[in-house]
Amino acid sequence: MNMKFSKLLLPLCCFSVLLTLSAASTLLFQGFNWESCNKQGGWYNSLMNTVDQLAQAGVTHVWLPPPTHSVSAQGYLPGKLYDLDDSRYGNAAELKSLINAFHQKGIKCVADIVINHRCGTKQDGSGIWCIFEGGRSDGKLDWGPHFICRDDTAYSDGTGNLDSGAPYPDAPDIDHLNPTAQQGLIEWMNWLKTEIGFDGWRFDFAKGYAASVMKIYMQGTSPDFAVGEIWNSLSYGNDGKPNYNQDSHRNELANWVQGAGGAITAFDFTTKGILQAAVQGELWRMIDPNGKPTGLIGIMPRNAVTFIDNHDTGSTQKRWPFPSDKVMQGYAYILTHPGVPSIFYDHFFDWGLMEGIKQLTAVRTRNGINQSSSVKIMAADADLYVAMIDGKVIVKIGPRYSVGNLIPPNFKIATSGQDYCVWEKQ
């Protein structure tokens, strides 16, 4: 196959100055799906029953759903940001009890921060829903149309700044260049830390405002861990499959991380897109021209959060799902490779994959695999991918059973399943 490869846009020498705020052995768990808001008895109460199991699996951080009042049941059209009692997941007291239960097991809690846009709770004199209420008696986060980007013409009064990021048509786009808005949102996030107990942030639709603004939010709130959602399409060929070279896609993520100050992580959508194509008989996709992994973890692993599916790509939305019969191959890959792996609730609790995933997390923990672990790719053919991590673990995915002489005699099988196997150095 004759391919042309573009050079990496982001020089590797820059990466050494990038720092993450979290520990090097971070293991993230997404603690909800798209239907969690409909749980009888409340989702927060339901999650109380999972704390011990997640601790046993080595989870260090749990990502919880948007906690605030919202026009939509799932929480992604927020209104009164200080009102945590008007949530379909439960009330503020239940949330604080859940966070405390996780903390007692040494697990930190990540809030889903939806601040790109916000829904007005009152209409102005023209009938436009552009009057915002914070949900407090002291007027905090009570805003008017001046706090809306002026190019969001459906809601704005024309006095705000232009949008610094991508538009969001379903709700008013907040003017994140407004210093009063910035300060109000920083104060609110710090309240979520001090009063509710959250430790870190998952920023929804982070491409909706400038990376330089994200840097301000990171500096103003000092989270233990933070990850941004920058979900843009991969490049595709005429056959409908992803192109082999996705450098521009992963460099976009890397440039955003740098622009946001280097302390934040980004969901590695590049790795997800390539991996879910690769496990369908095209595992040659998993090595780049420099012999590195092909996603963000190949150029900036300390700032990459790898995942198989989430509430958008999988669950009942299925907007970009991983092949359902190959999910464990995906976990064998991300749980043995660098970056911060994220485990999805559905796969762990609903798909019968808990034990297989726990065996993989145990290998990761025993061998100290972390964000910056080294990867030596030993094979990347259509039906076989083999890599050694930190010289201590070897992983194989793909349907080919024989791996020839690739596995040294001092490596023994630690866990295996359908089309995957992991060895540990003895």
Image (tube, grey):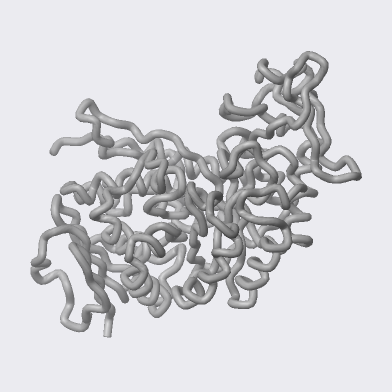
Q: Residue at x 54, y 41 (%)?
A: 256
The N terminus sits in image quarter: top left
Furthest-front residue in this view: 40
Q: Residue 373: where, in percent of width, then height?
A: 41, 66
Q: Residue 114: where, in percent of width, then height?
A: 63, 42
In the image, 101 versus 241, the foreground residue is: 101
- Whether residue 262 is visible, yes or no, is no
Q: Residue 12: where, in percent of width, then height?
A: 44, 50
The C terminus sits in image quarter: bottom left
Q: Residue at x 71, y 47 (%)?
A: 86
Q: Residue 83: where, in percent of width, then height?
A: 75, 48
In the image, 217 versus 109, the foreground residue is: 109
In the image, 126 versus 148, the foreground residue is: 126
All told, the count of numbered labels is 0
Furthest-right residue in this view: 138
Q: Is residue 18 above or below residue 409?
A: above
Is 385 positioned to the left or the right of 118 in the image? left
Q: Is residue 69 above or below residue 54?
A: above
Is 79 positioned to the left or the right of 66 in the image? right
- Whether residue 222 is visible, yes or no, is yes
In the image, 198 versus 166, the foreground residue is: 198
Q: Residue at x 16, y 48 (%)?
A: 281
Q: Is residue 175 above or below residue 107?
A: above
Is 4 positioned to the left or the right of 120 in the image? left
